Image (tube, rainbow, N blue to C red):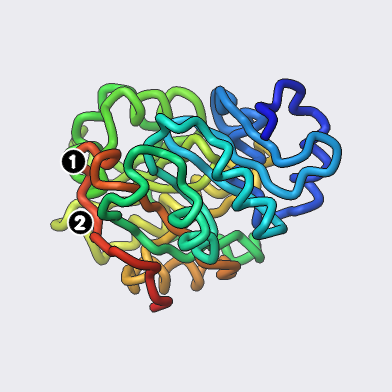
Amino acid sequence: MPLCVDREPLRPVLQTAGIPALSVFNLVFGRAGAPAPRVWVDDRHRPRAVVCRGRRFYLWATDSRAAGRLIRSLPRRSRLNFGATPLRFYRLIRRNWPGPDCSARVWTNPCFMFVLDDPRRLRAPGHRVEPLRPDDAPLIVSQWPYGRSRSYVASRIRRLPAVGIRRRGQLVAWALTHDDGSMGFLHVLAEYRGRGMARSLTVALCKQLLRLGLLPFNYIVQTNRASIKLTTSMGFRRVGEYGWFGSEAAASGRRAARLPSAPASR
């Protein structure tokens, strides 16, 4: 399958696909950071499957057969490591993966995708929210369970809206935007929870993204009921099931649930 050199023909295809292609669209065209360095398509003229690769692989497809053929054509030295990919393609990717870790044990984090449906519901308790600084990265990384480098977090702080709340000069709560445009890293230190800080951060981040012409959206681990309740109360709508998954060899110590077969919806 062809490595995509001219990406512009993909623009109307991914725009028409809408929300299901949002992460891939943002990565292919660098709407939330640097463009993904590599993009593959099943057909240059009538693409039905697109894979892009930055820190990991991302897949969008309307046709399972096209997706399977595209996965089989990826470089054979690739390691299995996917993000924000529809869970319905999990088994297809496992069956067709060409890399050396095709039979390895797999970790997975199944998530729900939410998009902002009603901006009128963006109301916050009114905490003072301010931009994050690159030197906030070490604390943010130390509190995040899924593994991210300081350089990645610092780059996100520099590129797109990243907000925090401080008490006596110390950072106590924060939220950032990932390289696919999704909102993430929302965290409040334990002793400051229950004060509405997560809501204030989400409102501030959403408003900044809207001003930039970007649709606010996020992915929440399916077992995180508190975050799901907060998100839906703020005018977000659940639109699908997505997942992060990969071989243990590609995980590089990332903490995640292990699952040898496709995850069940929860």
Q: Earlier in the sequence, mark 2 or mark 1?
A: 2
Q: Is residue 210 visible?
A: no
Residue 253: give its label: 1
Look at 63% across and 51% down and name the residue there: 67
The label nearer to you, 2 versus 1, is 1
How far apart are labels 2 and 1 at the CA level?
29 Å
Q: Residues within 10 Å of mark 2 (few under 14, many from 20)?
A: few
Element under disc 1? loop
The local secondary structure at tag 2 comes to helix
Rendered position, 228 above or below 21: below
Amino acid type assigned to the residue bearing label 2 in the image:
Tyr
| Left or right: residue 12 compared with residue 98 | right
Relative to 66, is 80 on the left or the right? left
> At x 79% / y 34%, what residue is drawn?
44
Q: Residue 212: image x %, image y %?
A: 66, 36
Front residue of this view, candidates 212 and 21? 21
Q: Is residue 37 above or below residue 226?
A: above
Q: How many residues crowd around disc 1 within 10 Å: few (fewer than 14), some, or many (20 or more)?
A: few
Of the numbered discs in the image, which one, if any, rests on residue 192?
A: 2
Q: Amino acid at mark 1?
A: Gly
Label 2 with label 1: CB-CB less than 8 Å: no
Q: Position of residue 172 (x, y in %)?
A: 23, 45
Q: Is residue 18 left or right of 105 when viewed as pictured?
A: right
Q: Is residue 32 above or below residue 20?
A: above
